[in-house]
Image (cartoon, coloured by chain):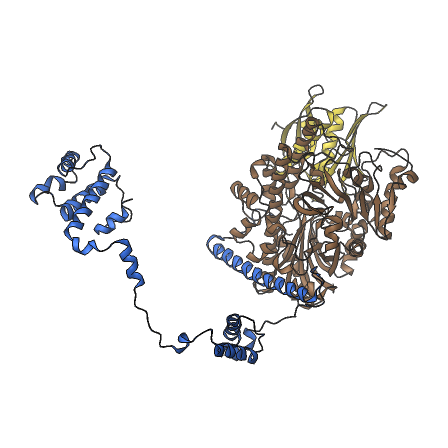
Chain colours: A yellow, B blue, C brown
Amino acid sequence: MGEIKEEDWHLPEIKYEYLDHTADMQIHSWGNTVEEAFEQCANGMFGCMTDTDYIEMAETQEIEAEGHDMLSLLFHFLDEFLFLFSAEPYFVAKKVEILEFDKEQFRIKARGFGEQFIIGKHPQRHEVKAITYSNMQVNQTEDGLTHIHVIVDI
Amino acid sequence: MFKSKLTALEYHTIEGFNPEDDKQFRALVIWLEEQKIRHYKVEDRDPLRDLESDKWPIVFNSYCAQLSCPITSGKKAERLEWLLSHAIRLEYSDNIDKFSTQTSTEVLKNRQNTPKVVSSNPLDNLDFESEDFKKGVNSLAKLLQITPHPDHLITLRAISKLISQRLTAEAIKDVDSVVPKGKAYPFDTVDDGFEKGNKAVNSASKILRLLYLHDLRSLQTKINESIVAVQNLTANPKTDTSLGKVGR
Amino acid sequence: MVVRQYNEEMSYLEKTSAFSWKIKKGFQPNMNVEGVFYVNQHLEKLMLDELRNACRPGMIGGFLPGVKQIANVAALPGIVGRSVGLPDVHSGYGFAIGNMAAFDMSDPTSVVSPGGVGFDINCGVRLLRTNLTEKDVLPVKEQLAQSMFDHIPVGVGSKGIIPMNARDLEEALEMGMDWSLREGYVWAEDKEHCEEYGRMLNADPSKVSMRAKKRGLPQLGTLGAGNHYAEIQVVDEIYDKWAASKMGIESKGQICVMIHSGSRGFGHQVATDALVEMEKAMKRDKIETNDRQLACARINSVEGQNYLKSMAAAANFAWVNRSSMTFLSRQAFAKQFNMTPDDLDMHVIYDVSHNIAKVEEHMVDGKLKTLLVHRKGSTRAFPPHHPLIPVDYQLTGQPVLIGGTMGTCSYVLTGTETGMKETFGSTCHGAGRALSRAKSRRNLDYTQVLQKLESQGISIRVASPKLVMEEAPESYKNVTDVVDTCDAVGISKKAIKLRPIAVIKG
């Protein structure tokens, strides 16, 4: 848990949206780099659970994730943050930053800025039950942007 | 292990006697010597009586040797076993007349020979197979609207069941307590998947099924009762509203 | 996925009766058995429209249409009978929701699939009766709804108020409802009236990950969010007087409480863990399926057995959860009416699961076989005289509790012999979604939804009011259509209809 520095207070523009899906929530995020797309995806996940405007950046939590390919890396990356919320410390992040991204070994170290979820302070939205591999995609389009599609079960 | 022998000798501590406990062991040995074996003269028993002494094991060893105890190894339990048997042998020979006739067959016979009580109750002395008796049962059945069974003893059982359940003084006073209330099961109309062609067989199988369910229900109720009995011991339902935020 | 023209697809589908359609082999590759789905006219249109949309060129699709998923399941090794789509079927993860599939335990190639159970293991419904009537409750309806809301933690991030430590959790996972009984949270008669008597004996908490236990512990005794709810309902119609009276329902206007909830984060983690394990196992055991999401493992493999044991633990978690909420509901009522729950006669009518896999015996082609029956979004519906149903329901058949969506009616059905033969004793579970959440958000306004509920005389307490339009009745298929279809096909019979007067949601 590092110190929150002045530059950390800067909030990125929102680069994620929610797409049509019958029962669950499909998150579509994008970014100029793979890292950015991943970060926005995590922000999108927290946005399902609560209104991130209400989250204060009181502390940080770090996670490490690894996978055997890009998709499983994305899966575990999101799952680690989900676990931070579901059990102690019940953490929700206002924004997520990737510290290290090893594209060969498929490893990520990331940090979330936020605080503990408190009913009454943070609006209750959806409960993300699980990350799914359903139609999971990490693509690069011609303009160099990375797009991520992932469906979370709610 | 020594329970039966200790009981026979009328020792004061039978339950919970532990031969490995030195104190108990020594106490038993001295009691045996003083009450049963009486090998030494009274004055000579002193060293054996000295339960706390370090020399006691040596004294005990020489005591056993003097009694010609065949077990020379240090095994306490085995020596004790022999001592107890020895004490019993002595007890027996002291009262040989009293004990000699008490073989196991004799004891058994005595139990059976308890004098037969001649019943003064005339009902007990009836001949249950006589024609008169059978006629009587059947006419009683007709009176109570019970279908007579070819074996009149079964009819008699049915009669007694009816009387004891429905015709006692309390039952007559408070009809509701014995007559089950509620809707009758639509017996004829319900298809129980029992169609075997023959109407009588169908009815019979339906009835058997219903009786079985009745028994099953009582069994289930008994099970519930035992669960409740356990709950009385274990239950402690608690809630702590400070743990979670409820309501708004 | 084979992409064909709609007309060609239709050649594989055959309407075999007014309410049932056959899916012939070849609709999807490698089908081992045929598929079948039950719909009425209205639901039929929804199913076929879904298929038509998927056949349009250029569709990336995030999900396959329900009919395709039913067919993919039919291609799994070891499946017997037919892959069945109940009237509320809609697409899901791998298996459609509202899909039943049974596998022969004696076949060594048979598989078990967590997708065939669902993420919310043992999501189910419990119905309590009371001897209160609508007249008793109407004057205090708002207070009673508030009392329920004050007793039962709901919504994302909520934590349970029944104190538990890690050891309690281990015991609860192993003992299921017996734990709740021991601790005194429920009555002995409640256990009688619960599917599996509230406990799956093959549960093994040691097969469950630490992560799942950490997620589960704070959530025990909470309702959850999404389509979970607790409702105070009124008996609106009685179709089968005899069956209803055996359930303790004597007249219209009688008050009941319905709880719809599952195994919360615990079950979800168990399912996620299993899927990860099985993906590896599939490569090793060379199991091929039509859909990557149909992750499965041989029933007899280590992964398969581990899943079944941890699934049973999750099922037990859900029963303890519903039992805890039974306790809290009884408290809420007792407080409001100043009477003990005993005096109010708040008995459990029944408790059903609609996301679970069970080992059951069924007749297949005239022979008695032991099958692993997966029911995802499908409820067990056993007929009268089946040995596994409670004594009280031996003559009526197992009660089947169908929860409607927020503000719509719920039903109680009974199991039938026909159902036993046609669908291995399975029927629908509820309404099934019709509109996506995003569409609901676009087309409906939450204040309008709340107002409509109010005008129907339904008190509502919701943790996330702004999202209530996603759960509005318009977002779902019509539960009456679904239930009527099941009744028409004969796989379950209508017994009671209930309408809500208060809803508590996350």
At x 80%, y 56%, the residue is C488
Between residues C251 and C451, which one lies in front from this camera angle?
C251
* Residue A114 shows in the view: no
Between residues B236 and B218, which one lies in front from this camera angle?
B218
- In the rendered image, the residue lying farthest to the front is B131
Q: Give above or below for C135 relative to C366.
A: below
Q: Give above or below for C446 relative to C203.
A: below
Task: Tell me if B125 is positioned left or right of C241 in this view.
Answer: left
Q: Residue A52, position in %: x, y? A: 71, 38
* Residue C502 shows in the view: yes
Quarter occupied by the N terminus of chain B: top left
Q: Residue B224, position in %: x, y? A: 53, 58
Q: Residue B88, position in %: x, y? A: 20, 47
Q: Residue C161, position in %: x, y? A: 57, 48
Can you tell which quarter of the image residue B210 is in?
bottom right
Task: Tell me if A148 is positioned left or right of A80 in this view.
Answer: right
Q: Give above or below for C268 relative to C254.
A: above
Task: Tell me if B50 is positioned left or right of C13 in this view.
Answer: left
At x 54%, y 52%, the residue is C181
Can you tell which quarter of the image residue B108 is in?
bottom left
Q: How many marks?
A: 0
Can you tell which quarter of the image residue C83 is in?
top right
Between residues C171 and B162, which one lies in front from this camera angle?
B162
